Image: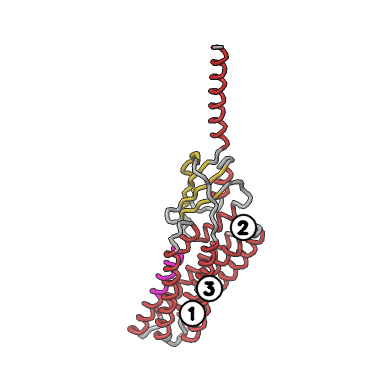
Amino acid sequence: MMKQKITRVRFCLFLNIFSIILLYFCSVKKSTIHISKMDCPSEENMIRMKLEDQSFTKLDFDIPNRNLYVYHDDDIEPIFNSISALNLGASFIGSEQNNDPIIHEDYSQEKKLLWTVLLINFSLFILEMITGFISGSMGLVADSLDMFADAIVYGLSLFAVGRVAAKKKQVAKISGYFQMALAAFGIIEVIRRFINSEEIPTFQTMMFISLIALLGNAISLYLLQKSKSKEAHMQASMIFTSNDVIVNIGVIVAGALVYFTNSKYPDLIIGCFVFLLVMKGAIRILKLAK
């Protein structure tokens, strides 16, 4: 009788140890990868598309701290190697067992919010592009392309939901080349206006339209912050929109300098700076197509 009890105890102990070992190897792991150059939605999309063929449970992006948390069952090395190939300054921090339940949330409200922000950006792009050419302000034209770049990123994110990888890459490629062509045209036009004698841009239009754009971006930023979402794409959108606010203020300052100096150069300088930012964004988008 005593031997049977001992045998049962040993068997139960063996089952407990086996269960712990099985739980360790079968439970989802959480790996942290620091990505130093991940600072906007372009990099997040780039990484998601790069990992299309990899096996994982969930990706959690912490863009403000430039960290990516990968929840996975298999080896992290293939995932890390894929991210490293993007040359975004990826470094592996470590892995740990994840004992918390993984919740896949419904992002329908956030999608509606992103649609709102996308429409605001696209409307401001049209407004600034038209008034920029009418007033002769390259600052407004450049700012309009910055708005267009944002609309592309938001639109690409929304369009990519439920699409196959090939379709995502095709859209990214078309968008990237189109944006790059516009930025290149803008830079060439700025150089032409530097060399030739051009009329001084209408500073009143510059400042007024930029104030409207600033108000639009401020509303977008307010809506994004009001959502209080901790999700990566929403945090990234806040960062992107905050940068737009800075660009809008730059164009307003350029308009004021045009007035005080009676010169075209402040407008051309801010225009060239923003065109270069747009070109950088286009290069990032094109990386999505690789």
Q: Which residues are magenta?
A: 238-250
**Which residue type carries mark 3?**
Leu
The residue located at (53%, 50%) in the rendering is 103
Comparing 194 with 238, the one in front is 238
> Percent position (x, y) of residue 275?
48, 72
Comparing 262 with 197, the one in front is 262
Residue that badge 3 annotates: 119
Residue that badge 2 annotates: 290
The residue located at (42%, 53%) in the rendering is 65
Comparing 136 with 150, the one in front is 150
Per the model, the C-alpha gap separating discs 2 and 1 is 32 Å
Local SS, label 2: loop
Determine whether, in the image, residue 29 is placed left or right of residue 215.
right
Local SS, label 1: helix
The residue located at (42%, 86%) in the rendering is 202
Residue that badge 1 annotates: 128
- Figure check: 119 above or below 260: above
Precedes in sequence: disc 2 or disc 1: 1
Local SS, label 3: helix
